[in-house]
């Protein structure tokens, strides 16, 4: 069964304090790994898709990387507006159009 | 485009009552997904449609849950009878037909069953 585990569950940082969020996955065959941002009271919003080990994608203060077993979302010099829950999801080769989501990491950036 | 539109945003109902959640996908997106989000289980796929046809309903928890997509611009998720454990946020998402790309979520319906 395809599984996604994110850590930590919650992370509190000071503004400007860089860190990384982890997404570990087990999947029969990976077609794509997705990162989403979710703000309170809203639906998840797409950030990145990664397809193969070694791939990296960047957007503003966020950089996503992928290995054969896990993905990291690096946040550099975060600002309070980066506070949100970050969700990781995998699309398996056998998964048709199904995305399997992790539980998310709730990130809080204090000014 | 207004994005994926869900209604109502909040629903409070008594146990045993019927609940209907509604979704309008993005125009041109031919795939529609219903997800449920809880603290315990996170985001779970309930059912999805391609070109108005249900493809995979293996995530629907029980026969009390049913979903329909009568046309390309409208879908409903019905719970009858509702139970307190159905309390959750229900999301609808749409994408280009046959893909997970451009997967766009609505703002969700927060359901509380008392």
Image (cartoon, coloured by chain):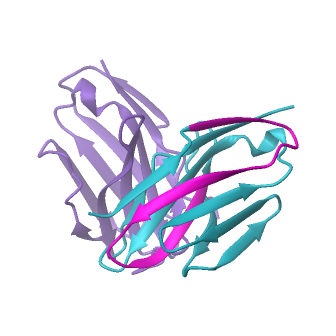
Residue at the spot 66% in from the left edge and 58% down from the top edge = A73
Quarter of the rendering containing residue B18: top left
Residue A33 on the magenta segment: yes
Q: Is residue B32 left or right of residue A14?
A: left
Screen quadrant of the C terminus of chain B: top left
Residue A37 pos. (x, y %): 63, 52
Q: Is residue A8 above or below residue B82?
A: below
Image colour assigned to chain B? purple
What residue appears at the point 83 percent right and 43 percent down from the top-left corner?
A17
Across and down, in percent, residue A32 comes to 49, 75
Note whether residue B24 is visible. no
Please check the rendered image and state whether residue B55 is part of the magenta-colored stretch, yes or no. no
Q: Main secondary structure of the magenta part?
A: strand
Q: Give the range drawn in magenta.
A: A10-36
Q: Is residue A79 left or right of residue A10?
A: right
Above or below A8: residue A48: below
Task: State the image coordinates of residue B95 (x, y, percent, origin top left).
Answer: 48, 71
Foreground residue, A43 or B24? A43
Q: How many marks?
A: 0
Q: Which of B70 and A68 is in front in this view?
A: A68
Q: Chain A is drawn in which colour?
A: cyan
The image position of residue B60, as x and y in percent, is 21, 51
Q: Residue B72: name its quadrant.
A: bottom left
In the rendered image, which quarter contains the N terminus of chain B?
Answer: bottom right
Is residue A48 among what the camera can see? Answer: yes
**Relative side of B88 to A51, left or right:** left
- Residue B49 quadrant: bottom left
Q: Is residue A46 above or below residue A21?
A: below
């Amino acid at each position: 069964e395809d599984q996604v585990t994110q850590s930590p569950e919650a992370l509190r940082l000071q503004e400007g304090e860089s860190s990384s969020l982890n997404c570990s996955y087990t999947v029969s065959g990976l077609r794509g790994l997705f990162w989403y941002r979710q703000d309170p009271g809203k639906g998840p919003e797409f950030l990145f898709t990664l397809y193969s080990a070694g791939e990296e994608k960047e957007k503003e203060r966020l950089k996503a990387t992928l290995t054969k077993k896990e993905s990291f979302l690096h946040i550099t010099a975060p600002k309070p507006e980066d506070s949100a829950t970050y969700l990781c999801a995998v699309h398996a080769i056998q998964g048709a159009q199904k995305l399997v989501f992790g539980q998310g990491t709730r990130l809080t950036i204090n000014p | 485009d207004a994005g994926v539109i869900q209604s109502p945003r909040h629903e409070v109902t008594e146990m045993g009552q019927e609940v209907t959640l509604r979704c309008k996908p993005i125009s041109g997106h031919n795939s529609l997904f219903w997800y449920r989000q809880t603290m315990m289980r996170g985001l779970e796929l309930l059912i999805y449609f391609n070109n108005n046809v249900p493809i995979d309903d293996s995530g629907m928890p029980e026969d009390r849950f049913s979903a329909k997509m009568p046309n390309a611009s409208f879908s409903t998720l019905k719970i009858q009878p509702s139970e307190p454990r159905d309390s959750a946020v229900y999301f609808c998402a749409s994408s280009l037909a046959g893909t997970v790309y451009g997967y766009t979520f609505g703002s969700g319906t927060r359901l509380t069953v008392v």
